Image (cartoon, rainbow, N blue to C red):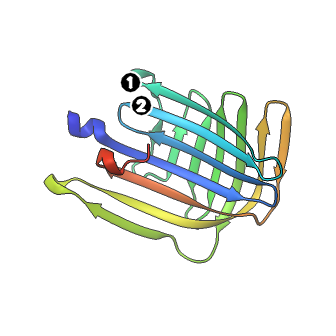
Amino acid sequence: MAVERRFQKWVHVHFETRDYFVVANVAHLGLAGNISISLYEKSTGETTKSSKTSYWIRNEIRTDENYTLFEDPVSGSFMRLEADGGVSFCVYTPGMHFEGEASCYLGEPFTQITGYPNGLGAIQWWGNLALQKGFVKCGYRVLQLEKGAKGAYDRTAGHRRMKLNWN
């Protein structure tokens, strides 16, 4: 039971545009689920962020068996890794919404497997992305993000030691 509860899976995307850095994730951390969005405005240095964490049975975040689709039916959020290496996403948090599509950029994704004692370990995939379309909504402001903005994703599934876990 304790090992199963430590099984974690998430997908994280980020992009840099001329004016913004935007980051979002959908994560199932065993005991809790988290959905978050952060927006950094380069001209002002202001960061706007929003996060929703659900614990125990209230955590309804789910994935498919290959960890290519992460979805939360409660918020309507999802991130989907496409067969061609791209990512589509729609993430809702209190007061924020980040939606878009990105294509694979600069070659095939990188895969890493990290083993730990007792047969535990994690597999991670990283890929570079080019935004095809996207926007961020903060309250009543809607910010269109320029096509071609560069970014990346990190998709992870497995058992991680707490010292190594960014979540």
Q: Nearer the viewer, residue 21 or 157?
A: 21
Q: Which image quarter holds the N terminus?
A: top left
Pointer 1 with pointer 2, Cβ within 8 A? yes
Q: Which residue type carries mark 1?
A: Trp
Q: Dot 2 lies on which element?
A: strand
Which residue, given by chain and number where applicable, does mark 1 sit on?
Answer: 56
Q: Which image quarter holds the C terminus?
A: top left
Residue 97 visible, this angle: yes
Which residue, given by chain and number where applicable, does mark 2 sit on?
Answer: 32
* Residue depicted at 48% across the width and 26% down the height: 54
Q: How far across and how far down the image is residue 107, in percent?
A: 57, 77
Residue 167 versus residue 84 in the image, above or below: above
* Residue depicted at 26% across the width and 38% down the height: 4
Q: Which residue lies furthest to the bottom in this view?
A: 107
Label 2 environment density (alpha carbons within 10 Å; few <14, some 14–19, many ≥20): some
Residue 78 versus residue 128 in the image, above or below: above
Q: Dot 1 lies on which element?
A: helix
* Residue depicted at 58% across the width and 47% down the height: 79
Q: How far across and how far down the image is residue 155, in percent?
A: 47, 55
